[in-house]
Image (cartoon, rainbow, N blue to C red):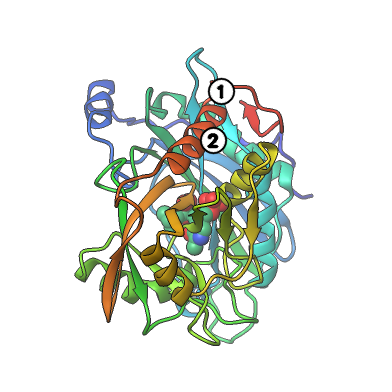
Amino acid sequence: AEASPSEFTIKLNANPMPEDERLQAFQSLGFGTLFSDHMAVIHWNVVKGWHSAEITARGPFAIDPAAAVLHYAQEIFEGMKAYRTGDGKVVLFRPDENARRFNESAKRMAMPEIPQELFLQAIDQLVKTDAKWIPEGEGSLYLRPFMFATEAFLGVRPARDYIFCVIASPVGPYFKGGAKAVKIWVSENYTRAAPGGTGAAKCGGNYAASLIAQQEAVEHGCDQVAFLDAAEHKWVEELGGMNVFFVMDDGSLVTPPLGGTILPGITRNSLLSLMRDQGMTVNERPYSFEEWQADAKSGKLKEAFACGTAAVVAGIGEVKFTQGSFQIGTGETGPVTTKIREQLVSIQRGKSNDPHGWVRTI
Ligand code: PLP
Ligand code: COI
């Protein structure tokens, strides 16, 4: 029988990190370098379905060198955060949306879907077990659910064995500069995803393909890469790990539409709701790199920002590309960006009311 959410075996880590070491590490949190004591693991195979769900000490997997993931990259992941609220509760933000998107990614990569309840239980059980790993204040516990193909087989077809796992990492700001506006490199040599490809799936391969462009961004002193569409190299799509919004001088916003080549961000979707709730106009429409340059120069474009789970909302101050560079607005994070960021963060952290029921208490 398939695993049901109540059937997690809990095996506590016999050697957890000592408390003083953990608290010391909390003093200088970056992104994704520190990990909690446990992980959630669930196995799937074609005969048993989902089975052997457990919370166990975080540690290496032993996988066969012929494991399909190592050759044909059947791997998907999610990114979400647990927060500690001012009144001591532990909350997640829209975890059902991560579960839903995870299964969309699974379908695209010919991998088994996981029942939403099982996905959410794995998250809940891990967060409960490692609750002391959720930093107070500005930090959060970043959760990384992922699934990969373990079947030892070199033929090219969907694998018959998978591991689903969740690890947890206490994090501070994604960008080293903290709240300072970021610099973006527009990649004209490389694209991220073509129509019919995997752009809307959160699969590791998309990120592998983006690394050379991200490396180019770093070489040019930038924090993130922005990709243009693959067909015309004309339309702004998204950043390596974030969606993008533009704030116009009439107070309206523009963000590229979802169309299969960009990741449907949960932050993007939440911001669209928050903005529209307040009567702001947001146009989901194609925005060209030419328009971006012209609007920045004429002053029609006041602000731009990146958004995603890891980065939250980050102002974009400067844009570089092979032929030159331009500044957006004052080059600093603008007031519209700051305000919408605060609105989102205060809902996520249980500081303001939650009209859409996005916050789930564990
Ligand atoms: N776009 C890409 C390529 C991403 O990796 C992410 C991060 O998850 C996002 C957008 C933003 O998605 P979300 O807001 O769901 O974190
Ligand atoms: C996230 O925001 O969760 C991401 O996945 C972005 C990046 C760290 C890959």
Q: Residue furthest top?
A: 87
Q: Residue at x 57, y 41 (%)?
A: 54
- Which quadrant of the view contains residue 271? top right
Compute the Cα span from label 2 to label 1: 10 Å
- The answer to whether the residue bearing label 1 lies less than 8 angstroms from the nearest atom of ligand 1 is no
Is 37 placed left or right of 250 in the picture? left
Q: Secondary structure at mark 1?
A: loop
Q: Residue at x 35, y 53 (%)?
A: 329
Which residue carries the number 1 mark?
350
Q: Locate the C terminus and report the quarter of the image it occupies.
A: top right
User: Where does the image place residue 59, in percent across and percent down from the top left?
Assistant: 38, 47
Q: Amino acid at mark 2?
A: Leu
Residue 180 versus residue 251: which sits nearer the camera? Answer: 251
Can residue 133 be spotted in the picture? yes
Q: Residue furthest right?
A: 1
The answer to which of marks 2 and 1 sits earlier in the sequence is 2
Q: Amino acid at mark 1?
A: Gly
Can residue 61 be spotted in the picture? no
Residue 65 versus residue 157: which sits nearer the camera? Answer: 157
Which residue carries the number 2 mark?
344
Q: Residue at x 69, y 43 (%)?
A: 118
Is 53 placed left or right of 344 in the picture? right
User: Where does the image place residue 224, in percent across and percent down from the top left?
Assistant: 34, 62
Residue 298 versus residue 289: which sits nearer the camera? Answer: 298
Of badges 2 and 1, nearer the viewer stands 2
